[in-house]
Amino acid sequence: MSVTHTVFNQPRPLSNSNLFLSDTPLREAVVRFDAEWDLELLASVGQQLGSSESLELGRLANAFPPELLRYDARGERLDDLRFHPAWHLLMQGLCANRVHNLPWQADARSGAFVARAARFILHGQVESGTLCPLTMTFGATPLLQASLPPLFADWLPPLLSDRYDAHLQPAPQKRGLLIGMGMTEKQGGTDVLSNTTRAEPIAARASGEAWRLVGHKWFFSVPQSDAHLVLAQAPGGISCFFLPRLLPDGTRNAVRIERLKDKLGNRSNASSEVEFDGAIGWLLGEEGEGVRQILKMGGYTRFDCALGSHSLMRRAFSVALYHAHQRQVMGKTLVEQPLMRQLLCQQALQLEGQTALLMRIAHAWSQPADEQQRAYARLFTSAAKFEICKNATPFIAQAMEALGGIGYCEESELPRLYREAPVNSIWEGAGNVMCLDVLRVLRKQPAVTEMLAAQFDGVKGLNRHFDSRWRQLRLRLRKPQEAQAREIASQLLLLATGQQLLTTLEPPLADAWCRQHLDTRGATPIAEAVGERLLLRATGS
């Protein structure tokens, strides 16, 4: 056979790297926020997840999405799902690393929330769909610890275990449990008060009693979960119910899976439409307090959306930077080309800021007894979910552009990362919902503005761009307008990020971030010495 050409100047794909040790900003933040005790495990997890074997599991789980098995061979209703083995292996790793329950352990150490957030970021760089059941279980666990009906008290030990158990068995016989959610209906979406699913008491109307539900859910996440938290209309208003997949007598609950969603991304994860044909659920908390109950877990799941988007961005950047160090154009590698180098440095700087702020928010979540920390977590979780999730799609598109055509093809990781990006902006409340929540916190908690003033004034004089932006925003916060909610949320997040970097980062890098993101005249080129430092930090060098 004749040889038509020789293949050269084609970069190797990024694999067999340590996702944690190569991320200097994340390593520093873990130490800064009291989770230094987890460094050894994080390094081990980073090595395992960065392996070619783990990356292949992520690809397989999405290439072979779950199947709905509605009936068996005899025509009996099953409502089961079949997953590729890669899904189960990824889930085993997530549960073994306690991404679903680390801070809720009785012996949880200081900084457990930060350590868990770091583990989440590492897993999210390999596969995102498997994070959905883990984040819902994580958000639901403290609610169930406080209000699980006595009939289900034996659920708590397997809920807090480090095991993944996919078998369809009664909960007390399982080594590990997962919890899903069912809120959204066809006519309502975000407006859960318009839900039409009805709940009628079987006997008493008190908390912890059984009710019968009739209705539907338009998005019923992870239908294979052992139980779901569901909102329904009770006589006393919207209420929250605990719906087990198997009833205490071992029979299946009357939850009918109509179909699985055919989604843009998040292909490995099962999202479904269901109908409740007299399903049995147990009331959590008081009748009519369903929204309040769900909001208790909403902050955790919204924070995970921001973590998940950051994970996608970090992986896309790592792939692009690794490619740029190898690919040559006109006798020089891409990373040596001034314009490409600027783009990569800008992305590295953006990730520096996100890492610092996300770990600061995780630190705030770990201190529920401190009123100021609770307010910080509530305010900046919504702002981070809005801004970071919104930025993920164009960020990943830029990384794809750095690779050119090869990055657009399915053999690359980037198309999957790109398809995955929009889900975090939509799930758990779209951008407008997050921005209105930011406004709600500012209006209902006047002490929050005082907290912001104390923190932002603490770095006064360190950077003129920061000082100028803070003066402008302070004027808006006197009478915040709903029409300006998106701008207010963005500016709050930028200032909180700047405050973190000015406090903790090397001054030249912090100043470069402020010029890029806070200078009203627009971004300026990053100095060569600063850019070199940023790219070294981005590779753990």
Image: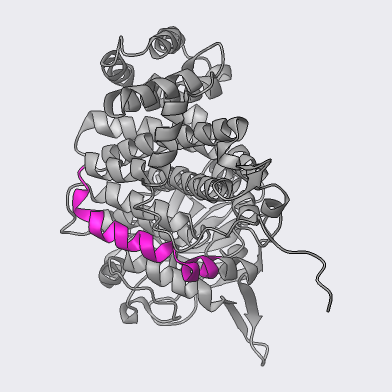
Quarter of the image for the N terminus: give it: bottom right
Residue at the farthest bottom position = 74
- Count of numbered labels shown in the rendering: 0
Colour setup of the view: one colour
**Residue 468 percent location from the top left of the image:** 42, 8
Q: Quadrant of residue 370?
A: top left
Q: Quadrant of residue 250?
A: bottom left
Residue at image x 43%, y 12%? 465
Q: 538 or 514: nearer the eye?
A: 538
Taking the magenta stretch, the answer to whether it contains residue 159 is no
Does 29 sit left or right of 37 as displayed?
right
**Residue 303 percent location from the top left of the image:** 41, 43
Taking the magenta stretch, the answer to whether it contains residue 51 is yes
Q: Main secondary structure of the magenta part?
A: helix
Residue 226 appears in the picture as rendered: no
Does 225 sit left or right of 158 as displayed?
right
Residue at image x 52%, y 15%? 481
Q: What stretch of residues is rendered in magenta?
A: 34-58
Residue at image x 69%, y 54%? 406
**Residue 315 percent location from the top left of the image:** 50, 50
Residue at image x 20%, y 49%? 36
Q: 526 or 273: nearer the eye?
A: 526
Residue 524 appears in the picture as rendered: yes
Q: 303 or 326: nearer the eye?
A: 326
**Residue 381 percent location from the top left of the image:** 40, 36
